[in-house]
Image (cartoon, rainbow, N blue to C red):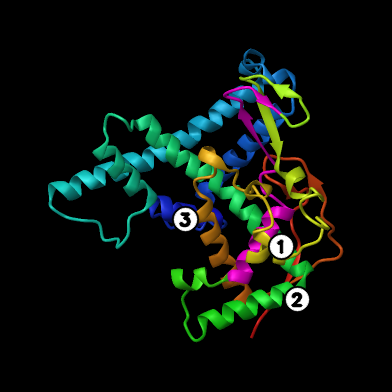
Amino acid sequence: MSLDILMKCTFSQDTNCQINSAFDDYTKGICEGSEIIHKRSFSFLYHHDIIFKFSSEKHRLQKIANNLYQYTDKIIQERRKALKEEKKHGKTNNRNYQDFLDILLSAQAEHDNSFSDTDLHAEVNTFMVAGQDTVAGTLSWLLYNLAQNPEHQERCREEIRGILGDESSITWDHLSKMTYTTMCIKETLRLYPTIVSISRQLSKPITFPDGRSLPAGMTVVLSIWGLHHNPAIWENPKVFDPLRFSPENLEKRHNYSFLPFSAGPRNCIGQNFAMTELKMAIAMILLRFKMMLDPTRPLILVPRIILKPKNGFYLSLKKIS
């Protein structure tokens, strides 16, 4: 579902990826690429560029990257051709909106010298690769948490029903009013952050309060999982409690105590898109189904780039009449 949304918002393509096998190589490539990146992150030898360069994993990763590039390049060139034809004949596209690719191509046309084709491909591929598994994973964890905590599930459902009333479609105004549902999403991101760690290279030396210091140029890994489960910041950190994100509780904590999208100038540029996607998806699901845990399928967490259980998620759904 998350890839379908990305394809629609990025390229205006209706894909139905779960059924349409034409996109199997694309989705498998993203998953396999993530596995290789994870393996390199935790392999001391592969930290050395020379060693990794001559490994079989590097060659496989390069092949995956080339395939993803060719796929997006084909779409970009087709769109460019269509835009030229439209301009030539004085026509406009039949869509009443601009997708992500339209915006990027417009930016490139306005800033030709500062926005190259390499930049264009990088932006498109970053948006596609970073936005697929992360949103799908967070939505899965959210469904799991609401199934495990039916009182919160019901409160979200009642909130959404109260906001929508007799209306059949969800608008921006509706999304802004889903306060409790948003708190449940944020608590899910705290309890099960999709990206469990991030790394940064120090641009200058840093000295910690205890006197220890690190030199400029060193790569530092920050554990988002550790931060989000720190009992000094979060009381009973293993408990699912959406009220941690009520306005009064937010005021008591440091802004950097909650970092599901990182922070600062290199934070996740797609966080607003992701939150919108999550609110839309959970609203449509809760209006149609009740979720219950499958007690025969316990979760087993495994270390990966994207946090997910070893054998997937298993929930029971009951259709709401």
Q: Is residue 314 magenta?
A: no
Q: What SS does tag 1 mark? A: helix
Residue at label 2? 151
* Distance between the alpha carbons at the discs numbered 3 and 2: 36 Å
Q: Does the magenta stretch include residue 195?
A: yes
Task: Using residue 117 as the reference point, say whether residue 317 is left or right of it.
Answer: right
Q: What SS does tag 3 mark? A: loop
Locate residue 53, reporting x and y percent: 61, 17
In-front residue for pair 267/282: 267
In-front residue for pair 190/130: 190
Q: Which of marks 1 and 3 is in front?
A: 1
Locate residue 41, reporting x and y percent: 69, 29
* Distance between the alpha carbons at the discs numbered 1 and 3: 38 Å
Q: Considering only order in the chain, which callout, 2 or 3, is on the residue closer to the N terminus?
A: 3
Q: What residue type is labelled 3?
A: Thr
Which residues fall within the magenta stretch? 179-207
In-front residue for pair 253/96: 253
User: Residue at coordinates 12% horizontally, 50% vertically from top-left?
Assistant: 89
Give the number of the disc on residue 15. 3
Q: What SS does tag 2 mark? A: helix
Locate residue 299, reporting x and y percent: 82, 55
Give the number of the disc on residue 244. 1
Q: Which residue lies furthest to the left in this view?
A: 89
Task: Using residue 137 as the reference point, say whether residue 225 is left or right of it.
Answer: right
